[in-house]
Amino acid sequence: MAGTALPGRLKERLAWRVARLVAVRDETSTARTLVLEVPGWPGHLAGQRVDLRLTAADGYSTRRSYSLAAPADGDRLELTVQKVPGGEVSPYLTEVFSVGDPLELRGPVGGWFVWRPADTAPVLLVAGGSGLVPLMAMVRARRAAGSRVPFRLICSVRAPDDLYYAAELRDAAGRDPGLDVTRFYTRAVPDHWTSPPRRLRAEDLAAAGWPPDFGPTCYVCGPTGFVEEVAGALVEIGHDPARIRTERFGPSGSSARG
């Protein structure tokens, strides 16, 4: 109804805030993690995202949505941005945006594609390319909470150099007891790999994931085609569709809940 005041927390999430870049980390040759300081940040759940707004000197502005890459840490949050050739926003964020520079953001956004430390069901995470970002936030949130909930993460990328957070995932056994990580490569494999590159199949999900009768919550994130194929394969091998949560990423870096 017009004129009705928005609830306080909703107004807080919809308000644009000024964030400043305080640190960067290169994840691949074309992807960068941005560490932002956001005064008064209300916190967020693993799997949520934020809207960014960039405004040019002539007043032109554009917006994009990016998943948060780490759990809440006071007024700091992390985004990992993949440069999209010919893109309007990602080349600026990955090549021009510098420590101390401001941008506007609002959020957190989304409440379906999230994981909470209080959840006790086993978790299966399936990532296609940059779809790993919100799933990595869940892995990190589990670690930060000291959770013993068993996680299995399946990553599908084109080549070894395209895997985000490679060193952190390589050390998963020592850092995150109860987290199993399985990698698949679609175009090129590491030198020591014994199988050729190929796309993720239903039998791979059955072998590397949880049996359906364990009742896991499944999170699938990546390009639309990947998400649809994986979600369909999970149902095919017996997983409850009601326990499959999906998020699809478009070419602009925007995302949509499924």
Image: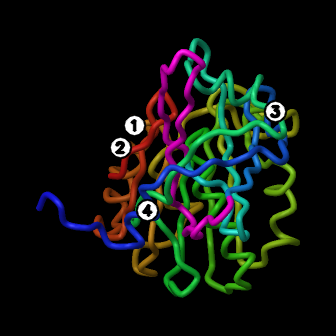
Tell me the residue at 74%/77% (across/down).
144
- In the image, is 245 to the left or to the right of 219? left
What span is colored magenta in the figure?
39-66
* Residue assigned mark 3: 98
Secondary structure of the residue carrying tag 1 is helix
* Closer to the eye: label 2 or 4: 4
* Closer to the eye: label 4 or 3: 3
Secondary structure of the residue carrying tag 4 is loop
**Above/below status of 210 relative to 221:** below
Question: Which numbered tag is attached to residue 224?
Answer: 1
* Residue assigned mark 2: 228
Q: How far apart in space, not on screen, are marks 2 and 4 (Cα)?
A: 16 Å
The tag earlier along the polypeptide, 2 or 4, is 4
Badge 2 vs badge 1, beta-carbon distance below 8 Å? yes
* Residue assigned mark 4: 113
Pick the residue in front: 32 or 55. 55
Amino acid carrying label 3: it is Ser
Badge 2 vs badge 4, beta-carbon distance below 8 Å? no
Badge 3 vs badge 2, beta-carbon distance below 8 Å? no
- In the image, is 220 to the left or to the right of 175? left
